[in-house]
């Protein structure tokens, strides 16, 4: 099957260069996710990644641990905010990424940081004029971050620190990545390149065989009713260290949806066909009051992630995890609008159908 011209495959070790420090910092949370419903331990952690994580943590001293907390903590993942720059600038490896970072003005790094998660409330575009005011005026920055940015308290505190001295922020980010390259990544980059190149071929074959249906699965769109707009360019990449996870990025006005798949994400897609696991996903999704609140809001009208932030006053992290669980359970559908923004929706019939299917699975009915 011929793939659409809007689909591009991008191979780069720079994706793992950023995701591996994040994985090392937050590995215990990853293990919990694998052990809980719906996966219930059906996907084993990759032994190679586990060994890498242990090695990284063994060589991490107090100074590096502090920097990891600034840039790669699960509640303050600023170090991942340049992930789409890898694709947009066709960066092939870690050294090229560090050269790119060296030339990038600190204010541009801060702009990426402000777009973390769903970005500022109301879909605010961080134009040069606004960014300049935030850098010059501390009271305006305080007001903007307090009212327009849906970050946890720790992430807001780190952002204030970065804005107080952008040059120092960049120095710390570069120092951390240079340390990571010298002490760990340079020894394993060739192996990562070989593995990710092979995995990318597998994903390309998967898409060629299944066409739009396979694309919808990788992008987590429902091909039965939702379509990815024709104007949106889609880049598929692989990060070996993501394992059974999948990440995405779409900077405003970039016209690109970047999908980064882990080494075991295909295995996760196969598991999703299991009716028992699908039933577990449904009941898990309905077991939390915040996810039920999201369902109630979306049943009234579709919302983007930014709009959900506005009406719920929840953080990006809480909404992102909630929507992920609802989407995995098939209780929420989503599509991209003409701006390239993800719009989530649901309705009573969709939820009732999923619950009824799950009950039939529980009682062995066809």
Image (tube, rainbow, N blue to C red):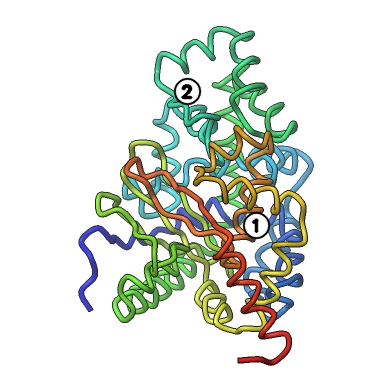
Residue visible at 60% across and 54% down in the picture: 323
Question: Is any atom of residue 242 visible in this view?
Answer: no
Residue visible at 74% across and 43% down in the picture: 65
Q: Position of residue 316 (x, y in %)?
A: 63, 41
Residue 190 appears left or right of 161: left
Which image quarter holds the N terminus?
A: bottom left
Residue visible at 59% across and 18% down in the picture: 144
Q: Position of residue 59 (x, y in %)?
A: 73, 54
Q: Position of residue 260 (x, y in %)?
A: 46, 59
Q: Is residue 311 above or below residue 227?
A: above
Residue 93 appears left or right of 344: left
Residues at badges 1 and 2 in contact (C-beta under 8 Å)?
A: no
Circle 2 sits on which residue?
107
Q: Residue 256 shows which numbered tag?
A: none
Q: Kindly state the secondary structure of the residue where label 1 is placed.
A: helix
Circle 1 sits on which residue?
23
């Amino acid at each position: 099957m011929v793939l659409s011209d809007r689909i591009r495959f991008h191979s780069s070790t720079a994706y793992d260069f950023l995701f591996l420090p994040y994985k090392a910092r937050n590995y215990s949370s990853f293990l919990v996710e694998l052990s809980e419903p719906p996966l219930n331990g059906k996907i084993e952690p990759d032994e190679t990644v586990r060994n890498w994580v242990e090695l990284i943590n063994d060589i991490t001293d107090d100074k590096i641990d502090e920097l990891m907390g600034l840039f790669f903590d699960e509640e303050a993942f600023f170090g991942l905010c340049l992930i789409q720059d890898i694709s947009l600038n066709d960066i092939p490896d870690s050294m090229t990424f560090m050269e790119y970072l060296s030339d990038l003005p600190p204010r541009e790094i801060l702009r990426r940081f402000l777009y973390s998660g769903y970005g500022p409330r109301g879909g605010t575009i961080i134009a040069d004029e606004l960014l300049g005011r935030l850098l010059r005026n501390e009271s305006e920055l305080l007001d903007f971050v307090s009212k327009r940015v849906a970050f946890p308290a720790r992430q807001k505190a780190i952002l204030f620190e970065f804005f107080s001295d952008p040059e120092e922020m960049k120095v710390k980010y570069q120092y951390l990545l240079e340390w990571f390259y010298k002490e760990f990544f340079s020894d394993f980059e060739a192996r990562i390149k070989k593995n990710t190149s092979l995995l990318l071929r597998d994903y390309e074959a998967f898409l060629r065989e299944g066409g739009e249906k396979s694309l919808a699965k990788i992008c987590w769109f429902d091909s039965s009713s939702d379509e990815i707009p024709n104007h949106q360019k889609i880049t598929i990449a692989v990060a070996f260290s993501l394992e059974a996870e999948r990440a995405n990025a779409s900077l405003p006005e970039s016209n690109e949806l970047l999908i980064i798949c882990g080494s075991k994400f295909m295995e996760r897609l196969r598991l999703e066909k299991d009716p028992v696991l699908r039933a577990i996903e449904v009941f898990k999704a309905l077991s939390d009051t915040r996810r039920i609140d999201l369902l109630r809001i979306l049943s009234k009208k579709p919302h983007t992630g930014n709009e959900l932030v506005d009406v719920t006053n929840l953080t990006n992290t809480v909404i992102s995890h909630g929507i992920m669980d609802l989407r995995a359970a098939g209780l929420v559908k989503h599509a991209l609008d003409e701006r390239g923004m993800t719009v989530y929706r649901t309705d009573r019939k969709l939820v009732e159908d999923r619950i009824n299917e799950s009950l039939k699975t529980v009682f062995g009915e066809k």
